[in-house]
Image (cartoon, helix red, strand yellow):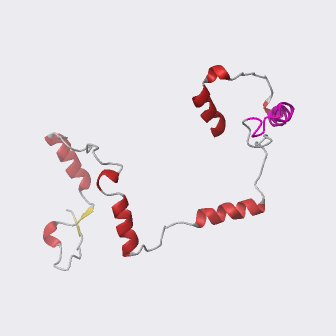
């Protein structure tokens, strides 16, 4: 699908011939396979990446295993070294940061007294750490708002 979209963007719709066929849902996969074969539209002769008919295709056990292995490579739950953290920081610092130059959503926002009161009431019963309760070692003590 991506290949055809790229070619349409590059060459424009006027350079493509479009045919429409009315086919029932149950015969759609078979007709797609047949048309791809008849018109020989598998890449590089056309824009199809394979023989078509994906509705009832299931990945093999080997493919499932490869997908599982690819998805298991993640940084979730792993500790990054200090050096790695510094490299990430350098790569996204200043103008390289995607939010660089973007205005903050909350800048120049004002809330009415009524809105502030509602926010305050919604916080009752929730945990918070007042500045005064921070210990010298930086450990936080929580207290329940009354």
- Residue appearing at x 77%, y 62% in the figure: 61
The image shows residue 113 at horizontal and vertical percentages of: 14, 42
Residue at the top extreme?
A: 14
Q: Is residue 107 visible?
A: yes
Q: Is residue 68 magenta?
A: no
Q: Quadrant of the C terminus?
A: bottom left
Q: Quadrant of residue 128?
A: bottom left
- Residue appearing at x 25%, y 55% in the figure: 123
Q: Is residue 45 magenta?
A: yes
On screen, residue 66 versus residue 114, left or right, reads right
- Residue appearing at x 18%, y 73% in the figure: 134
Q: Quadrant of residue 53?
A: top right
The image shows residue 24 at horizontal and vertical percentages of: 80, 28
Residue at the bottom extreme?
A: 137
Instruction: Please give the count of numbered marks on the rendered protein.
Output: 0
- Residue appearing at x 78%, y 35% in the figure: 41
The image shows residue 73 at horizontal and vertical percentages of: 57, 66
On screen, residue 66 versus residue 106, left or right, reads right
Q: Is residue 120 above or below residue 75?
A: above
Q: Which of 15/78 is in front?
A: 15
What segment carries the magenta color? 27-46
Q: Is residue 94 above or below residue 45?
A: below
Q: Quadrant of the N terminus?
A: top right
Q: Is residue 17 above or below residue 97?
A: above
Q: Quadrant of residue 46?
A: top right
Q: Which of 23/42 is in front?
A: 42
Q: Is residue 1 visible?
A: no
The image shows residue 36 at horizontal and vertical percentages of: 81, 34
On screen, residue 57 versus residue 96, left or right, reads right
């Amino acid at each position: 699908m991506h290949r055809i979209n790229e070619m349409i963007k590059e060459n424009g719709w006027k350079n493509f011939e479009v045919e429409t066929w009315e086919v029932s849902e149950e015969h759609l996969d078979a007709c797609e396979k047949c048309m791809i074969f008849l018109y020989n539209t598998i890449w590089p002769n056309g824009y199809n990446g394979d023989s078509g008919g994906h509705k009832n295709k299931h990945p093999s056990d080997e493919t499932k295993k490869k997908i599982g292995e690819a998805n298991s490579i993640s940084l979730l739950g792993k500790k990054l070294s200090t050096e790695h953290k510094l490299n990430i920081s350098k790569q996204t610092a200043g103008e390289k940061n995607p939010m660089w130059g973007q205005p903050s959503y909350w800048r120049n926002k004002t809330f009415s007294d009524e809105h502030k009161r509602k926010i305050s009431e919604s916080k009752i019963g929730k945990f918070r750490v007042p500045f005064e309760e921070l210990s010298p070692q930086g450990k936080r003590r929580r207290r329940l708002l009354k």
